[in-house]
């Protein structure tokens, strides 16, 4: 027996199918339009982004005993701190790229070549077992090579002497008769001499030691200079010796940067480095 569908129901089905098709087409157009707009917004935002690509050479990383790699950096007045689990790294490759992005222009400084920056990476394994040892690390300072294209910098590359130099200072201290004072703090005093830049209005000063980073903005440089009757701005940063990746030791390397548009020429950001020598008084470093 053949069931006949009344014409009015058949017409209703046709209208329903047609309406659904119109809805799907319209919805698809909205989705694609939104995607195009999102892509355009991303491209527009990326134009204002400064990119440093830190390339970590895995051939010189203890992939078996390392649990994560801590990356710290100071770029264009901004500080970075990022942990990369070893489990997330493709073991078939001989390097991992860490993309560090920040705004080309902020309230302190607008990036330009050849502004300076630094990136450090720490191989973190069994923290409890290795707590009092000198954590294996590498650091690299560089100049921004471009504002529109990524600047590349290498870490743990063959031939790097960064860790070896720190290790030599650490070993010499262990073999000396000098005992560490009973201190659980490390003070790092950063100096920014401004005799050649007396008109500087605003600065940011940053310091990093053993994967820990601190920074401070000096909103009114002129007021501070007038009050101190000096041509130098200084900041002392206090770090806990007990960090989450190990104990800060004599020989640990520390970095500092000073950023501000009024510092150029030569650069809007200038960086320097030294190694920790003492715990009973501040470790000083002129950063420009």
Image (cartoon, grey):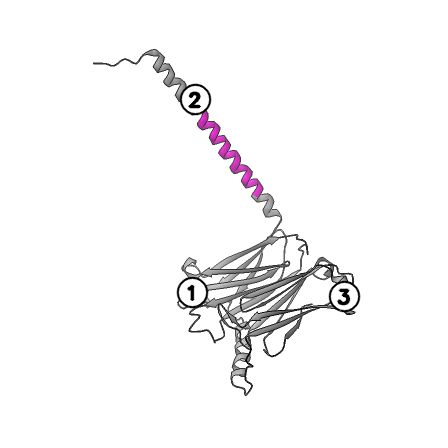
Q: Which residue shows up at 71% across the image and 57% down it?
A: 261
Query: Where residue 194 is drawn, which disc sits there?
Result: none
Q: Give the left or right position of residue 271, taking residue 100 as reference.
A: right
Specify the quadrant of the image occupied by residue 192: bottom right
Q: Give the left or right position of residue 147, taking residue 133 as reference.
A: right
Q: Name the residue carrying label 3.
A: 225
Q: Mark 1 or mark 2, which is nearer the start of the sequence? A: 2
Magenta-highlighted stretch: main secondary structure? Answer: helix
- Is label 3 in contact with label 1 (beta carbons under 8 Å)? no
Q: Name the residue carrying label 1.
A: 67
Please state which of residues 9 and 52 is positioned toward the viewer in this rendering. 9
Please state which of residues 148 and 72 is positioned toward the viewer in this rendering. 72
Residue 197 magenta-highlighted: no
Q: Name the residue carrying label 2.
A: 19
Q: Which residues are magenta?
A: 18-41
**Label 3 – label 2 distance at C-alpha:** 73 Å
Q: Mark 2 or mark 3, which is nearer the start of the sequence? A: 2
Please state which of residues 216 and 112 is positioned toward the viewer in this rendering. 216
Instruction: Residue 148 in the image: state x and y as whole percent.
Output: 62, 51
Q: Which residue shows up at 56% across the image and 67% down it?
A: 139
Residue 31 magenta-highlighted: yes
Q: Which residue shows up at 79% across the image and 65% down it?
A: 226
Query: Is residue 74 visible to us here?
Result: yes
- Number of other residues with Cα within 10 Å of mark 3, as a class: few under 14, some 14 to 19, many 20 or more: some
**Label 2 – label 1 distance at C-alpha:** 57 Å
Instruction: Residue 37 in the image: state x and y as whole percent.
Output: 55, 37
Instruction: Residue 129 in the image: state x and y as whole percent.
Output: 42, 73
The local secondary structure at tag 1 comes to loop
Query: Is residue 195 visible to us here?
Result: no
Q: Give the left or right position of residue 75, taking residue 23 as reference.
A: right
């Amino acid at each position: 027996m053949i069931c006949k569908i009344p014409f009015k129901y058949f017409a209703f089905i046709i209208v329903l199918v047609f309406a659904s098709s119109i809805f799907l087409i319209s919805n698809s157009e909205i989705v694609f339009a939104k995607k195009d707009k999102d892509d355009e917004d991303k491209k527009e935002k990326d134009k204002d982004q400064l990119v440093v690509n830190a390339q970590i050479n895995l051939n010189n990383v203890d992939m078996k005993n390392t649990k994560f790699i801590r990356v710290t950096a100071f770029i264009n007045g901004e500080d970075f701190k990022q942990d990369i689990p070893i489990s997330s790294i493709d073991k078939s490759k001989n390097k991992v790229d860490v993309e560090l992005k920040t705004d080309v222009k902020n309230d302190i400084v607008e990036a330009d070549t050849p502004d300076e920056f630094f990136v450090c990476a720490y191989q973190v394994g069994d923290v409890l077992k290795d707590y009092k040892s000198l954590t294996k690390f590498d650091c690299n300072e560089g100049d921004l090579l471009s504002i529109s294209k990524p600047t590349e910098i290498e870490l743990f590359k063959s031939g790097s002497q960064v860790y070896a130099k720190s290790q030599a200072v650490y070993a010499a201290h262990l073999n000396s008769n000098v005992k560490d004072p009973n201190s659980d703090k490390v003070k790092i005093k950063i100096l920014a001499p401004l005799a050649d830049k007396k008109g500087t209005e605003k600065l940011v000063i940053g310091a990093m030691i053993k994967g820990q980073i601190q920074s401070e903005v000096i909103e009114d440089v002129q007021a501070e200079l007038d009050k101190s009757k000096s041509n130098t701005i200084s900041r002392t940063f206090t770090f806990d010796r007990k960090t989450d990746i190990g104990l800060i030791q004599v020989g640990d390397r520390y970095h500092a940067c000073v950023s501000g548009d009024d510092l150029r020429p030569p650069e809007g950001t200038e960086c320097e480095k030294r190694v920790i020598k003492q715990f009973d008084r501040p470790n000083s470093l002129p950063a420009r």
